[in-house]
Image (cartoon, rainbow, N blue to C red):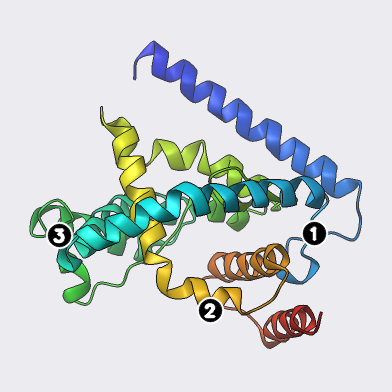
Amino acid sequence: MTLLNYRSFSAQILFIFSLMLLTACSQSNNKTYNSGFASSFDPYEKTNRRIFKFNGSLDKHFVKPVATAYKAITPEVVDHSVSNFFNNLDDVGSAINSLLQFKAGPALMDTNRVLFNSTVGIGGLFDVASALGMERYDEDFGQTLAHWGIKSGPYVMLPFFGPSTVRDATAKFTIDSLTNPANYHDEKFAFMALRLLDQRADLFNDEEAFKNISEDQYTALRDLWLQRRNTAIKDGKIDSQEQSDLIDELEALDDD
C-alpha cells in the first residue's frame, strides 16, 4: 500500500467513526427512535424532500431519457451481460462483508461465484454460477456495521444516489467503495455511468406500479426502502408484525 493510499484509507476510517458519533448523538437526542422499519425516523424530512424533488427532476429531464435510449438500442442479451458484469463486481464486496460478519458459507459461495463468473463467465458477462445452482448473496458494509450493532441513524435522501441512512451512506462511500474493483480502473467514471444507465433501465417495469402505491411518493419510497433494507440486514427474516406494519402504513398512505 502506497503512502498516498494509506493516508486516503486513514481519512476514510476517520470519516466512518465521525459519522458513527453523529449517529449516536442523533439517537441520544431522540429516545423514540430505533433502527427498525416501523419508526421510519426522518428528522431531516424537509431537506430530504427537497433532494427527492431534485433527484426526480434530474431523472425526468436527463437520466430517464438517456436510459430509455440505452434500452432501445441495446440488445437484450447485451443488457443482461452488463447487469451480470456489475453483479459479479458486487459479489467481491459481498464475499468480503460475509467474511467480516463471520458468515463462512455465504463468503465461500460468493467467492466461488466470482471465480466461476470471472473465468468461465468471461469476466462476469455470463452468470455461469447461477446456472450451476450457486446462490447469490448481497452483503455490503452497511449490513456488516448493522451486524455488529451499529445503529442506522436517521434516514437521509442522497443527491443522485437516493434513499439511505447515516450508517449506510457512510459505508457506501468508504469501505464499499474500496471493495469495488471498478474503482481501481482508469475508466471508473465510465463504469459508474454505465451502471447508472443499466440500473435505471431495469426499473422501467416497476416504475408504474410504484406510482400507483400512493400520491405521496416520498413517503412511500422511504417506508418501502427502510422495510427492504431491514429485511436485507436480517437476511430475509422479517416477522409478521413488521409485515403488518408495512401494510398498515401503505394503506394509510393510499387512504390519504
Q: Is residue 64 left or right of residue 112?
A: right
**Given the image, on which type of amino acid does mark 1 rest?**
Phe
* Residue drawn at point x = 44 percent, y = 50 percent: 63
Q: Could you tell me residue 112's position as x and y percent?
A: 22, 60
- In three-dimensional space, the C-alpha distance between marks 3 and 2, rounded to whole angstroms, equals 36 Å
Q: Secondary structure at mark 3?
A: helix
**Given the image, on which type of amino acid does mark 3 rest?**
Phe
Residue to which mark 3 is pinned: 116
Determine the residue located farthest toward the top in the rendered image.
3
Q: Could you tell me residue 18's position as x and y percent?
A: 69, 31
User: Is the residue marked by circle 1 packed among few (<14), some (14-19), or many (20+) residues within 10 Å?
Assistant: many
* Residue drawn at point x = 67 percent, y = 66 percent: 217
* Residue drawn at point x = 55 percent, y = 43 percent: 171
- In three-dimensional space, the C-alpha distance between marks 1 and 3, rounded to whole angstroms, equals 42 Å
Instruction: Compare marks 3 and 2 and give the one earlier in the sequence.
Output: 3
Q: Is residue 175 left or right of residue 195?
A: right
Looking at the image, is mark 1 or mark 3 nearer the viewer? 1
Does the rendering let one see residue 82? yes
User: Is the residue marked by circle 3 packed among few (<14), some (14-19), or many (20+) residues within 10 Å?
Assistant: many
Marks 1 and 2 close (CB-CB < 8 Å): no
Marks 1 and 3 close (CB-CB < 8 Å): no
Looking at the image, is mark 1 or mark 2 nearer the viewer? 2
Which numbered tag is attached to residue 41?
Answer: 1
**Given the image, on which type of amino acid does mark 2 rest?**
Ala
Quadrant for residue 181, please give it. Answer: top left
Which numbered tag is attached to residue 209?
Answer: 2
